[in-house]
Image: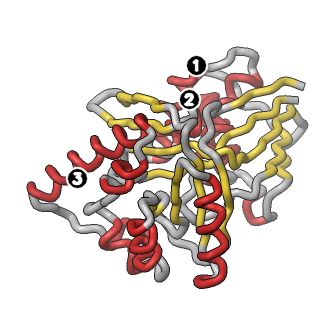
Amino acid sequence: MIRISVPATSANCGAGFDTMGLALDWRGEFSFEKADQLVITGCPAAYAGEDNLVWRAYQKGCQAAGFEPDPLHIHIETDIPFARGLGSSATCIVAGLAAAWEIHGQPASRQEVMALAAEMEGHPDNVAPAVFGNLCTTVMTEDQAVMCASDMSLWHCLALVPDLEVSTAEARKVLPADIPLKTAARQAGMAALFVQGLERGDQQLACAACQDRLHEPYRQQLIPAYSRLKEVCMANAVPLWISGSGSTMLAISRDREQLESMRDWVSRHFGLEGRLVDPDGKGLVICHE
């Protein structure tokens, strides 16, 4: 049996729209065994067929490597919520791709897994941290992904998860087709300052630079609690952003107790579930049993 563990991720960190993703120690677990026919357990019956994303990723990996796909028993164990901006699809894609090589006894490099995962996902901001861990800043050039990982061990996180699904397609529809040059320049500066704040452990700087102008002004209408929570976080020097396309919002702090207090306050005033997590530094983990 092969067991593959992949972390949840929060994309669009701070001002890093479509470029920055953070791995979280909130993991999806996947096991793979050869079988006489495809069997998928641990997920709703509606997703236990040929169109299962883990299975499709496994087939994609086999095709890329020149392997003949074997029927598998795939078991999925995850409580990462679906359509909440926490990279649930990226965990499935990364697990399935990695399994293709492992099942055939020829482990792939992480770069190979990331490249194929980005192709399937359509962008690398979730899949890069799912593979490599930490905070990954990734930009797609004409023929490859250019990536840099930043250590996040100084920080703690609070995932605020509304009981509200937001599809990526729906969230994309509300974005403008064009932006002013001044807005683009401001965003680039904020993104650079945000990473500096994170790497230095400077919470004041990270919070001041955690101001997106490319997607949050438009997507906040899809998440009723966001505007008020952003005001409270800014007043307390706590960086907060819409995770991926939402509806989850992620707050970070050097002080775990600060996030514990925030979790309780948000629960009382907004009725939102909050989960304390830490950044994950491992990324993709593969074990043979």
Q: Residue at x 85, y 47 (%)?
A: 39
Is 184 in front, or is 195? 195
Q: What residue does disc 3 label? A: 187
Q: Residue at x 47, y 45 (%)?
A: 21
Q: Give the residue type at disc 2.
A: Val
Say whether disc 3 or disc 2 marks the residue closer to the N-terminus.
2
The reply, left or right, for residue 223 in relation to residue 145 is right
Q: Nearer the viewer, mark 3 or mark 1?
A: 3
- Disc 3 to disc 1, C-alpha distance: 33 Å
Q: Give the residue type at disc 1.
A: Ser
Say whether disc 3 or disc 1 marks the residue closer to the N-terminus.
1
Which quarter of the picture shows residue 146? top left
Q: What residue does disc 1 label? A: 109
Is 144 in front, or is 24? 24
Crowding near the residue tagged with mark 1, few <14, some 14–19, many ≥20 C-alpha atoms within 10 Å: few
Q: Give the residue type at disc 3.
A: Gln
Secondary element at image label 3: helix
Q: Quadrant of the N terminus?
A: top right
The answer to the question of whether label 1 and label 2 lie on touching residues, with beta carbons closer than 8 A, is yes
The reply, left or right, for residue 200 in relation to residue 104 is left
Secondary element at image label 1: loop
Q: Is residue 131 visible?
A: yes
Q: Is residue 59 visible?
A: no
Using the image, determine if residue 163 lies above or below residue 153.
below
The reply, left or right, for residue 166 in relation to residue 66 is left
Q: Position of residue 126 (x, y in %)?
A: 50, 45
Using the image, determine if residue 31 lies above or below residue 68.
below
* Label placed on residue 113: 2
